[in-house]
Amino acid sequence: MNFDSIAREPRKRRDRLDPRRVRIGGKTFWQVELGSEIRDGKHHRTNHGRAGVTLSERLRGEAVEAARLLAPYGESILDVVREHVRHKEFERRSETVANAVRMLLAAKTGDNLRVRYLSDLRARLARFAASFGERKLSDLEAAEIDQWLRLQGGAPLTRNTLAKRLSTLFEFARQRGWVTRNPMADVPKAKVTGKPPGILSVEEVSRLLERANDETLPIFALAAFAGLRSAEIERLQWHHVRFSENLIEVPAASSKTAARRLVTMTPNLLAWLEPYCDHNGPIVPPNHYRRMVEDRRRAGITTWPSNCLRHSYASYHLAYFKDAPALSLELGHVRPTTVFAHYREVVRPSEAERFWKIVPAVSAELSIAVVA
C-alpha cells in the first residue's frame, strides 16, 4: 500500500447543502440550506434554519392526511402539488372565450373562406360567447358544454352543427396552447332520427321544369338531375359545364367540402341544358330567387322542403342505378354510408325510372313540353 499517495489525497470537501447539527437553546437540531434566489445576477442561498426542518401542527396534519389520501394511487404529495401548480400556470396562460372567438374569426377571415361559412361561424360562436365570454377556455369541461348545447333547443341536426362550430373553436385554442385537449371529443352528438328527406314527385318536377323561365330552368335542372347544392350552382360558370365530355366540374372553391369533383350528366340533363351550350358567364342570373319562387307558384308547388331537388336526385338515383358508392362521389359525400342511410328505399324503382325519363320535347302548343 502506498501511504504517500493516501497522504497526498485531498480530503473530500463538505457540501454546504449537507445537513449539519446545531445547538439552539440547549437542544440539538439538524440544519439544512434550502433553495436559492438570484439578485444582481448572482445566486444567493437562503438559510431557512429551523423553518427548514420544522413544521407547524397544522401543516404536519395536512401533510399526513394528504399522504393518506394519495396512498391508494401511488402518488406523492410533491407530485400532486407540482401538477396542480402546472395546471394553475396553464390556466393563467389560457384565453377567454370572447377573445378566442374574436381571434378565430380574424384567422378564418384571413384564410379567404366562403362568406356563408364565416357568417354561420360568427353567428353560432356569438351565442357561445354571450354565455361564456369572460370564462377561460381551460375552465370549460365537456359536461358543462353539453348542458349548454341542450339548453339551446332546436333540431338534433342544428345542435350537432353548433357542436361542430365549437369544436373548431377549441381545436384552434388547442393549437395555440390555451387548452390541453379539445373537450368536444367528449360531448355526445344528438341522435338524428331517420326521417325520410323531403323530395318532389315525378309530376312536380315535370311541372316545375315546364313552367320555369329560360333563366331559371338550368338552376332547377342542375339541382334535380345533377344533385348540385344551391350554393354550388350559384358559383358555377357555364364553362364548368363540359358538354363534349358530359361532365360538370364543381371547383373546390364552389364545393361545400372544399374538394373538386366531377358530376356525370345523365342523358335527360344533357337534353335540358343543350340549348345553353353556347352560353358564357355565370349560370345564375341576378334576382334569381324571386323568379324561382314565381316558377314554383305557376307549377302549383306549395310545399318546398329544404334541398328538395338535391334530395330528389339522390333518392331517384339510388333507386334506379342502385350504386351507393357512385352516388356518394356525385354528391360529394365522404362516406357511401351517408347515402345509404338517408336515401335507401325512399322511392319505388318504377317511380325512379319515370324520373330519369323527364325530358324536354317540342310541341305545337309549347316551346318546351315534358315527357315523363
Image (cartoon, rainbow, N blue to C red):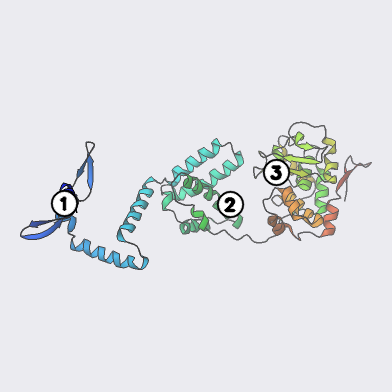
Instruction: Give the number of the disc on residue 313.
Output: none
Q: Nearer the viewer, residue 359 or 152?
A: 359
Give the residue drawn at x 78%, y 37%. 241
The nearer-to-camera label among 2 and 1 is 1
Query: What residue sits right under mark 1 in the picture?
Result: 3
Query: What residue sits right under mark 2 in the picture?
Result: 161
How would you rate the neighbour count of disc 2 (Cα within 10 Å): few for under 14, some for 14-19, many for 20 or more? Answer: some
Query: What residue sits right under mark 3 in the picture?
Result: 230
Count of residue discs: 3
Give the residue drawn at x 88%, y 41%. 368
Sequence-first disc among 2 and 1: 1
Q: Position of residue 75 (x, y in %)?
A: 34, 62
What is the C-alpha distance between the residues marked 2 and 1? 86 Å
What is the C-alpha distance between the residues marked 3 and 2? 19 Å
Q: Nearer the viewer, residue 214 or 274?
A: 274
Label 1 is placed on what type of residue?
Phe
Label 2 is placed on what type of residue?
Thr
Label 3 is placed on what type of residue?
Ser
